[in-house]
Image (tube, rainbow, N blue to C red):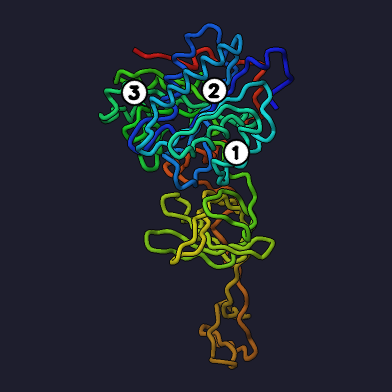
Amino acid sequence: MMDKSTNADNNILHIGFDDTDSRSGRCTTHLAFKILSNLKRNQSIKFLDYPLLIRLNPNIPWKTRGNGAVCIRLRTRNSKDIERITEYIKNEIEQNSDIGIGANPGLVFFEGRNIPDEIIEFNRIAMFDILSKQKAIKIAEKNKMKFFCYGNGQGLVGATAAIGCLLDSDYTFEVIAYRKIENCQTPRKIDSIKVIYLDRSTFPSTFNCYDHVHERILITPHGPDPVFCGIRGEDPEIVLEGLKMLKIEEKLEGYLIYRSNQGTGMHLINEIKLGDVKAYTSGISRCRVTTNPYTMQGGHVFFTVEDDSKNSCLAAVYEPTGLTKVAAQLQKGDLIEIGFGVRKATIKHPTVLNIEYISILETIQIYEFVNPSCVNCGKRMKSEGKDKGFQCKRCKTLDRYGKKVPLLNPRTIKEGLYVPTAKAHRHLTKPRHRYGIEKKGWDISKNNIFPKWFGIIG
């Protein structure tokens, strides 16, 4: 629920849309920017929250880029205004989506203050599982939501889930700067020195701006879409200040600050029994390593894990994550927690857990058996042959009944949390430094929105 009802409940509108882009271009968040640019001119509209950028299950095979949906929550004067807003947004979706070349938009409207629990639950599942368009339609019809589908309509799932995502626990912010359409086919020109300065000046209030290990800028995409850059952080004022630090020379269209689930690890909160793993889902498991890791061509590390129900599965740590050195040091018997996405089994390969993080909970002690030490001089003795005992080569002491003794082999791996290197982070990946500083909630009734959450540039 959002908060207690008021007489203005019928004037509150929640708008969700998804999958307006394709791999050829366009961007769902840019369409949100265009829509909000128009809506903000309407003096009768009051925005109840920042626009929400909701990233859904990143393992969906048919997603385009970041699998992000948008939700806008607003209040207006009367039902006539709601009708006009609904028609306007419907036209924008139809005219500004890549329908026919990969986009399959979904658009949903829900009127009322309180979001039904069924829609909230739909969003929770959409974070880690696969949901059908038919399920979204059923929920929309039951809850009297207006909805529209285009192409195959799969975007209806994300649109419905976005409305159900209240972000009332942990969340982050992202300011996205948009290019003018005439510049979208040209390379993005950004000064790496300014990005490094931004990162060093604002971290940890911003994150994933620059990968110092691989000397790589992380705030700019690489495709023809209209996003120039995006800066993520803990506070809307900080991310906007970060954008100003870049002193971008290209003439931009504007910027928009989103409240988001990015960097929260929201897709990795569902505990999965290894006997119930399903392709393309995300989750976590507390398990034991049951085979010593081995490294394949390309540097990828594989090993088998088993949960407390004695179900086992093959797990993989891929070289780009930067976790392979840690994974290679695991030993049979170690207790770990892993966050993962499930790779579908094929004729040639079994189901694999693609690991996103490793938390080492308990390491076993490893012993090797060595020859005994001489009781006289302390030097390690030599074997005289099978069942013939041992003799010291220094002082010639003979021990006919001596046996090999266990020697503890110290482990170099430490218990603790290991996350991927920054360049391998997905949108939802929680950076190491965010563990322990998660936000505790958002009160939509306070309406404490940063006034500069939207801006036109040039």
Quadrant of res 115: top right
Q: Which of disc 3 and disc 1 is earlier in sequence?
A: 3
Query: Circles 3 and 2: CB distance less than 8 Å?
Result: no
Q: Classify 414 as above or below 62.
A: below
Near-viewer residue (416 or 12): 12
Q: Residue 118 in the image: x percent, y percent? A: 67, 35
Query: Circles 1 and 3: CB distance less than 8 Å?
Result: no
- Side of 177 where 383 appears, left or right: right
Q: Which residue is mark 2?
A: 72
Q: Which residue is mark 3?
A: 179
Query: Circles 2 and 1: CB distance less than 8 Å?
Result: no
Task: Give amino acid for label 3.
Answer: Arg
Near-viewer residue (307 or 58): 58
Near-viewer residue (451 or 1): 1
The 10 Å Cα crowd at callout 1, few under 14, some 14 to 19, many 20 or more, is few
Q: Nearer the viewer, mark 1 or mark 3?
A: 3
Q: Which residue is mark 1?
A: 435
